[in-house]
Image (spheres, rainbow, N blue to C red):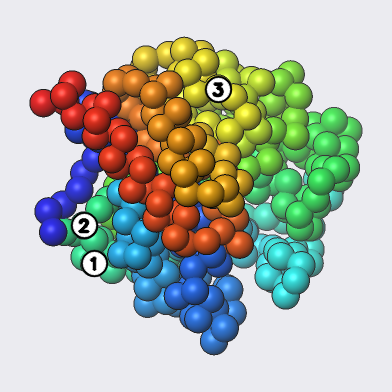
Amino acid sequence: MAYNDLFLRACRREPTERTPIWMMRQAGRYMAEYRAIRQAHGFLEMCKTPELAVEVTLQPVDLVGVDAAILFADILLPLEGMGLDLEFAKGEGPVIHNPVRTLSDVKALRVSDPIEHTGYVMDAIRILRQELKDKVPLIGFAGAPFTLASYMIEGGSTRAYINCKSLMWQEPEAWHALMEVTTDTVVEYLKAQIEAGAQAVQVFDSWVGFLSPSDYAEYVLPHTARLIEEVSGLGVPVINFANNASSMLDLVKSAGGDVIGLDWRIDIAKAAEAVGPEFAIQGNLDPMTLFAPVEVIERKAAELLEAVGTRPGHIFNLGHGIHKETDPDHARALVRAVHEHSSRIRGASAS
């Protein structure tokens, strides 16, 4: 098998003979092979056991045919090293038993040491680079400061962000101090991933779309921009994915990165115009499209690819993570459709 570097070339906005595709959460519960491992192991155990993380990371490369692997891990892993008591409770998702609610709580946090506290992630990356050397590139990742802070303050998932926004507005000193220590942690974590062998990194700001543009600009943008600036220049592309933030793409763009990840709530041609030619773009099929008949999946993929045309630097992805009840055959059908249709669009221009 020849090494497939389409993803990295697209990140650099170089011409490609077809559009590369990978899918957020591609290593996960929609695959029977993943569920078989999960039945015997806890989620955190899987993340912290490099051999298991490697096996799960490789599954969609071997079984779905995607053009890049993304490390199997979780965005919350660095929080333990910051001094937080993290548990993945069955049926509840992540739970932080000592949430951050005051300035004194913030001052008790420390910058997580990526080797001491998450060395298992770096071990998995080193193994994966060997396993993938004749296949596809490896993507590392981390949660963005706001998304991590929202979990830290709320103590888990939320739809209202009451505690998070209250701290942000009522105690800005505590808020910015929390964002500083979180940003420092993520910077060190991503630097360690790159040093271990990650060939690109994605910053997931999964919940930032719950903010208004003005609050993003005041309370989040300076910290995200610092994170991306400190990680950029280390020789690997940085993907900036701000979910549900299509109404403030200008601000997201100003945070930086080599690739701007797009959710499905914006027309990709309009997004590409708004982002500008200096960035590659990633996205942005609605994940629920994979529940449609295969012919609809193929048509939607073709429409999206036609809208982008031969613009350099497009990485096909879902607009958010693949749903756990997705039929793997539909995921494979999407990959085939993207490969075949984009080859017709881009093949002549890249030759």
Q: Which residue is mark 1?
A: 131
The residue type indicated by label 1 comes to: Glu
**Quadrant in the picture for the N terminus:** bottom left
Question: Which disc number belongs to residue 135?
Answer: 2
Dot 3: element? loop
Nearer-N-terminus badge (3/2): 2
Label 1, residues with CA under 10 Å away: few <14, some 14-19, many ≥20: some
Query: Which one is nearer the viewer's eye here, 167 or 348?
Result: 348
Q: Is residue 230 above or below residue 22?
A: above
Q: Position of residue 336 (x, y in %)?
A: 33, 48
Dot 2: element? loop
Query: Which one is nearer the viewer's eye here, 163 or 138?
Result: 138
What residue is rendered at 57% in x and 16% in y?
A: 250
Q: Is residue 287 visible?
A: no
Q: Is residue 258 left or right of residue 347?
A: right
Quarter of the view holding residue 79: bottom right
What residue is rendered at 24% in x and 30% in y?
A: 344
The residue type indicated by label 2 comes to: Lys
Dot 1: element? helix
Q: Is residue 52 above or below residue 152?
A: below
Tag 2 near tag 1, CB within 8 Å: yes
Question: Which disc number belongs to residue 92?
Answer: none
Q: Position of residue 11 (x, y in %)?
A: 32, 33
Q: Is residue 100 left or right of residue 202?
A: right
Q: Which residue is mark 3?
A: 267
What residue is rendered at 20% in x and 48% in y?
A: 4
